[in-house]
Image (spheres, rainbow, N blue to C red):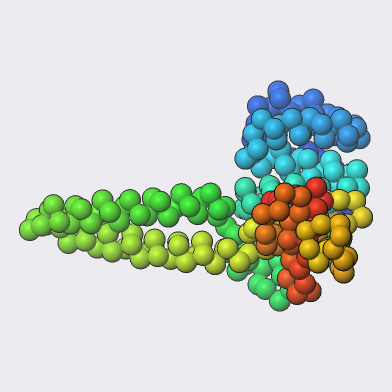
Amino acid sequence: MRNLFLALLLSLPGGAAAYDRGELVEFNDLYRGGHYEEALEGYMQVIAKEPSGQWGHYNAGNALYRLNRMGPAVYHYARAFTLDPRSGDIRANLDFAMRQTGQSLVPEGAPAALHYVYYILSEAELKALAAILFWLACLAGAAYFLLDGSKWSPAAGRASALAGLLLVLALAWAGARQSSVFSTAGVVTRAGGTRMLSGPGENFKTYASAPEGRIVKILDTGDEAYYEIGLPKEGIKGWALKTDVERI
């Protein structure tokens, strides 16, 4: 039943209301009509105009899934998720696509509710929250000293302390998120997966591979043609062509 529900979600273009409906109506009609390649071209135009728009990536993921291009589909769903982690549709389709590639959005054994709270804010929102709390702490602290002796001074002091405490918690939250699956990560988008070499070059030995659609850690970006990537679950790392891995 759950798979049927997710399949129904995939059958419909999503998030049209997030953009000018006139811009997406043609692409969505193409998608509904089964013209997934043409719809994908349109969604990629939307992404080019607004890279930070989650629904362009979400719709592109749907079209790519229909075209059986699992690596790029997982990538675009993952991008949409990092931009809007609270969307139920995005979460469901990302998890569905990840399961097709032997992964899952919620780690095994982790409470789903805790995972949702952990990702309830996007990285941009978390940074904005920290900035707001910082300035609130500063302004309330300044008011505490400027209003010294008045009836408002204690309230300003308490507000400054509370904002400071919340700022520390927000920074700790942001720090914890640096170890998340999607932080400094990429997706193997090459059909059939990518080779993992012992060094950055064809003269190095191939000793492992990463399957298409796998979310990997990007450990080193310094080489012109290769990323050093890691597979945390297997505990291995190696070098893969940058053209085979798309950074989230």
The x, y position of residue 199, in whole percent, is 78, 63
Q: Residue at x 83, y 29 (%)?
A: 29
Q: Residue at x 57, y 57 (%)?
A: 120
Say whether residue 74 is visible. Answer: no
- Tell me which corner region of the image, top left, top right, bottom left or bottom right, holds residue 119: bottom right
Say whether residue 23 is visible. Answer: yes
The x, y position of residue 168, in whole percent, is 40, 65
Task: Tell me if residue 103 comes above or below residue 152 in the rendering.
Answer: below
Q: Residue at x 35, y 65 (%)?
A: 165
Closer-to-camera residue (5/111): 111
The x, y position of residue 103, in whole percent, is 80, 65
Task: Tell me if residue 197 comes above or below residue 50 in the rendering.
Answer: below
Q: Quadrant of the N terminus?
A: bottom right
Task: Tell me if residue 22 comes above or below residue 129 in the rendering.
Answer: above
Q: Is residue 98 left or right of residue 206?
A: left
The single residue placed furthest to the left in the displayed view is: 149
Closer-to-camera residue (113/238): 238
Q: How many marks?
A: 0
The single residue placed furthest to the front in the displayed view is: 203
Q: Is residue 178 left or right of residue 234?
A: left
Q: Is residue 19 left or right of residue 195?
A: left
Q: Residue at x 74, y 30 (%)?
A: 45
The x, y position of residue 78, in whole percent, is 71, 52
